Amino acid sequence: MEREMQKQQQEESSYTVEQLVTFNPYNPDILPDLENYVNEQVSSQTYSLDANLCLLRHYQFEPDRMSIQIVSHILIKALMAMPAPDFSLCLFLIPEKVQMEEPFKTLIVLSHYLETGRFCQFWDEVAKSRRLLEAVPGFEQAIQAYAGHVLSLTYQKVPRAVLAEAINIEGPSLDKFIEHQAVNSGWALGKGQLIVIPKNEFNHPELKKSGGDIVPLEHIARIFPILG
């Protein structure tokens, strides 16, 4: 019996974390592997929602083993995945009383600002939480990409000042961002201080009347704070 258990442990140790999550997700022995994998995601700037959700489920059954740092990193990585709903999926697995504690309260506020397009308030809050967020490389760049995505759904022409406020950069760094978007998303410089964004089903004024082309209410809620 003991030999069989040792053999099973040896076999499991040869699996990748992704394979463990797929084939043996409820084994409590994989919890350290899942935690190490979160740290690996942070250092290598990779991401695995399935592995992170698996770890959060393990914490539900073993709350005494929950690492605040690991969970905060999971939530930060989930924010970086917006507009995907990963943050809400992760938050659902975290006890409510834990959510009321720092740093989770701050991360929830940041999520709310992003979901409602309140980028100015978001960056103000980020400035107060540098130490927390700088622990996860690539955070600001991911949010800047998300803000650009939201603006592209809102405008055909966006003032340079509005873009600068939404992504919290200006000067040469802003020029580089616009150049990147020009190459990858078809943005172009217009007259004056306007950036021209390609038309799409959301920013085009001639919306079709078919039900499949109705702008979701969630998208409209995001647009209003930006225009205000």
Image (cartoon, helix red, strand yellow):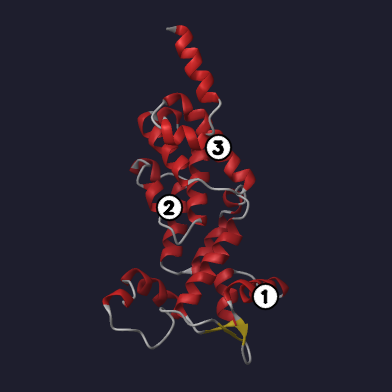
Question: Residue 204's spot in the image, x, y percent?
Answer: 43, 84
Classify 10 Å Cα crowding around label 3: few (below 14), some (14-19), many (20 and above): many
What residue sits 52% from the left and 81% below the top? 198
**Residue at mark 3:** 37
Of the residues tagged 3 and 2, which is closer to the observer? 3
For residue 87, the mark is 2
- Say which amino acid is labelled 1: Glu
Question: Residue 9's spot in the image, x, y percent?
Answer: 50, 19
For label 2, the SS is helix
**Residue 144 position by quadrant:** bottom right
Question: Residue 28's spot in the image, x, y percent?
Answer: 42, 25
The quarter of the image holding the C terminus is bottom left
- Say which amino acid is labelled 2: Phe
Classify 10 Å Cα crowding around label 2: few (below 14), some (14-19), many (20 and above): many
The reply to whether callout 3 and callout 2 are in contact (CB within 8 Å) is no
- Say which amino acid is labelled 3: Tyr
| Separation of marks 3 and 2 at Cα, in angstroms | 18 Å
**Residue at mark 1:** 179
Which is more N-terminal, label 1 or label 2?
Answer: 2
